[in-house]
Amino acid sequence: MKKVYQLILAVTTIVVMNACNQTESCDDVNCLNGGICFEGDCECPEGFSGPNCEISSFENGVFVLNEGNFNGGNATLSFYNKSTEMLSNGVFTSVNTIPLGDVVQSMEIRDGKGYIVVNNSGKVEVVNLSDLSSAGTVTGLTSPRYVTFVSNTKAYVSDLFSGTVSIFDPQTLAVSGGVSISGQVEQMEYVGGNVMVAGSGANMVYKLNPATDALTDSVNVGVGPSSLAVDANGKVWVLTNGGFGTEVPKLVRINPSDLSIELTLDFPSTNNYPGNLEIDGSGTSLFFVDGQVYKMGITDVALPSTPFASAFAYKCGVDPVGGLVYISDAGDFNSNGSVYRYQADGTPVDTFNVGVIPAEYAFTE
Amino acid sequence: MKNIGVCLVFIAMSAICFGQAGDSIVHPEVRVESQRISEAIGTSVSETDSLLFVLLKLQGLAKILQTESFISTRSYAPGGIANYSVRGSGSQHTQVVWDGIPINDPMLGQTDLSTVALNGISSVRVLYGSAGLTNNSGGIGGTIELQSLQPRKKDGFDAKLNLYAGSFGAYGVTVQLRDKYKFLFGTTTIEYHTAKNSFPYLNLATLVDRERVLEHAQVERIGFSKSIGAQINAKNTLTARVNYSQVDRELPPTMVMASTKEELFDRDIWASLKWTRLGTRSSLNVTASYIHGKQEYSDNNEYTYNHLYQASKNIIRYKLYLPYNLQLEVGGDIFSEHAKSDSAYSNDSHWRQWQAAFASLKYVPKKWVAAQILVREDVIDGKFSPVQGLVGVEVKPTNWFFIKGNVARNFRTPTLNDLYWRPGGNEYLKSENGFSWEAGLGFETKGKKFKFRFESTYFQSEIDNWIIWLPEGSLWTPQNKRAVSSKGVEAQLTTSVKVGKVMFRLNGAYTYVQSEVSEGSSQTDNSVGKQLIYVPKHQAKAQFSVHLGKLFLLYGHEFTGLRYTTSDNQSSLPAYQLSWVTIGYEHVMKKHSIGLNISVENLFNKAYQSIAWRPMPGRSFLINLTYKLS
């Protein structure tokens, strides 16, 4: 009997101590959005995640890619949930407890995963979109810029300074080789069974056959082609930067089947420095940034002379659903920036504050 | 390395020749006026302690300045690129001068402290604010003065050899020779330093393999200096000097980078020919100099970028001692700078012609009060700079108390990269204008066994037209779009006391700097009213030493306050404290002596970051053996 009492006493002590520990460990924990603290960790309701349930679902929203400073290691990811109108900053670090890296460049979404290209860290971080947990990393890259998928098992990533388009498997994240391209390489688009590659260093747009990984054709489009978009007619639009003063920048329309140039629109002067060509969900309206955001239709035969919105723009994004235009204002480029949202007709919607140097966007369904 | 071999032979021969000739006959002392900048009256100056300078110079100029001045330095890695901030300004707002000759890289507008070979340098001073305006413009934050190794004053020969080795693959050798024979005198130094910097650190940016060893961080520095002088007669002296350094560095990755192949090679040559004429009531200094800088950068794809700059800098100063304790000094500068770069300027060359004239009148009685008024005007490529000037006063009502202050106007011209970088350079940039004032007080007393000095200064400055690189469309270009206000307090204590045969010394310094953006680059600039990045508000440092004959024990401690890493002050690096200790002994045998110093850096093995995501070494050891012949 004595042993039974001792056992009961021991069990009671353990239970009480555990209860005390549980209470104490939750003292400093603030669970948001209906989360409940248990043993120091927040148990989040469906649709929320993060250490304090501060992150809402990653569905029906937009990732804001905050580049951060070169060599600053302060690239971050913000997420704006369009349903809950909730903004979460620094979501990658909140979930994975490590920094995202140095200069986040672009992000592609495919099959429930996000492929985040981190330029100066030489990697592509892959996350599960369900909770943004890490699903692995594509490493061994030098200066990656953009990812384009050609199948479930094959994707290309352009490597700006290495003169290479690297090949990797989105399932295994293994790099299996590369396609050598002269000079710097920027954006890519998969269209008509081929990948169009902006060879900004050689002033060319290349056609890359994903079946053979061979460059099958090319066309000179002017100095510094860096940005591509595919319109509703399957035509490829190319924006050149003119070499920043070497010649006037151009907006060029290419027929991807034979790489013939169908239209060339010259910017007014060599003092124009356009970039960041985007297209809306319907593929009928183009947007680009030249200090401010400009908009034009794919049937227009002249460049727009007045900006789409008055806000200063570093970069922009266009929501394929609903058509809202997101404009990135990076302030002094060394502090947290802002995002301005506009309706497709230029009417201001709202603004929210994000991380350091907000730049490009990735939209989720 | 072939060049170095030739240099070695030359040095050895030179030293032997002078050494053989100079041992037996005693000739009069060389009468050479100090090469120092005559700092403006009413300003603040700090100078390295001679013992500390000898101990710390093996670790580079950044370490010396961080330990002994109010300057805040930050290094990308041990021996890596080192930047600095004086009174809340940027590196480009501080002029580095070698024997009065400005040596800042005209392309970058600053000097990388890690590239300076120090064996041919005898002392380092920091002239705060516009204290260096008597010598040069551009030092809105201050002027760092490097003074060449001084020649022997009496006939003879002396030599010094250092051999040292330390943790993480560090070792090196320095040789210093000085000789004088009749009217000829000379100095020769050579140094070699290398360090792998392969120290362990904890990578905070990853969840796996957190315990790592820094890779690709090797540094190799070679330095050589030579001076030859002749005292032509009682009044005239001619001195030729050359200082050579080359640094080969691997640039290590940050914690958020997988790896890097980046490498940087720097070569600097400073050469001067100086004529000094000392009259009974006047002095004349005429300097012709050649400054050469070469930088080769190799990136991750092994592309190599080459930058090259050369400058001829001719300086004349005439000082006249007038009645009524007045000193008139007038002078002029004629500089010609040339830079070429295959990446920055697409192989184009850019020239800059620079002329300046200044006049200063000092009232310097032996007691009570001293005052100075100074005016300077620079003409750069035919354009007149803002008129610069300084009014300074010092009052010493008693032997132990003084007050001082000054008001000054200074400027900084855009760098050649600001003007001509392709793409983005802006030829229409204006100069940055600086206005500053300061006021200070101090106490000092000196006895047979006791010395005490305390000095404190309050300073305030405004810099407008601050140059900041911002994008226009997709093009980054520099613009005059910011203003910065700084204010702060500096306090410095130097004391020593002798008890029996034991000497105790304590040096301490504290600085508070509030350096804020007062005018933003745009309406959405979040930096307005915020502290500049990497400028700690609080910094404190102290060194305590005990000396018994030739034996000493030295303990140093340093506190660096929180530093913001984004201009809206939303992100920061935490404050850190570092300690170090050195024990040393010198055994003297008539003309020979042997010394041994053992140092432990980062005594308590603290993890810290000087720049975000750049690991710094934990506890390390350095042993230094010195042989002197005198």
Image: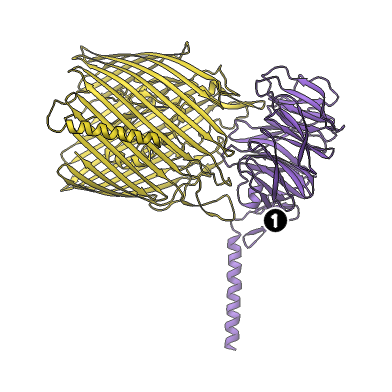
- B54 horizontally vs A310: left or right: left
Residue sitting at x 25%, y 24%: B229
Q: Between B544 and B278, which is closer to the camera in this rendering?
A: B278
Q: Residue at x 58, y 39 (%)?
A: B300
Secondary element under disc 1, as helix, strand or loop, is loop
Compare residues B453 and B272 and report the one nearer the observer. B272
**Amino acid residing under circle 1:** Gly
Residue A59 x, y percent position in the rendering? 77, 47
Q: Residue at x 49, y 17 (%)?
A: B351
Position in image of residue B218 (x %, y %): 46, 44
Residue B538, given in percent of the width and then of the height, sits at: 43, 39
Which residue has dot 1 on it?
A: A35
Q: Which of the chains bears the disc numbered 1?
A: A
Q: Quadrant of the C terminus of chain A?
A: top right
The quadrant in which the N terminus of chain A is found is bottom right
Q: Quadrant of residue A304?
A: top right
Q: Where does the image place residue A95, in percent across and percent down from the top left? A: 66, 52
Compared across the picture, whether A323 is left or right of B289 comes to: right
> Which chain appears purple?
A
Q: Colour of chain B?
A: yellow
Q: Is residue B385 left or right of residue B154?
A: right
**Front position in the image: B595 or A114:** B595
Q: Is residue B531 left or right of residue B167?
A: right
**Residue A60 visible in the snapshot:** no
As drawn, the residue found furthest toward the left would be B25
Q: Residue furthest right?
A: A233
Above or below, A100 relative to B567: below
Q: Is residue B187 visible?
A: yes
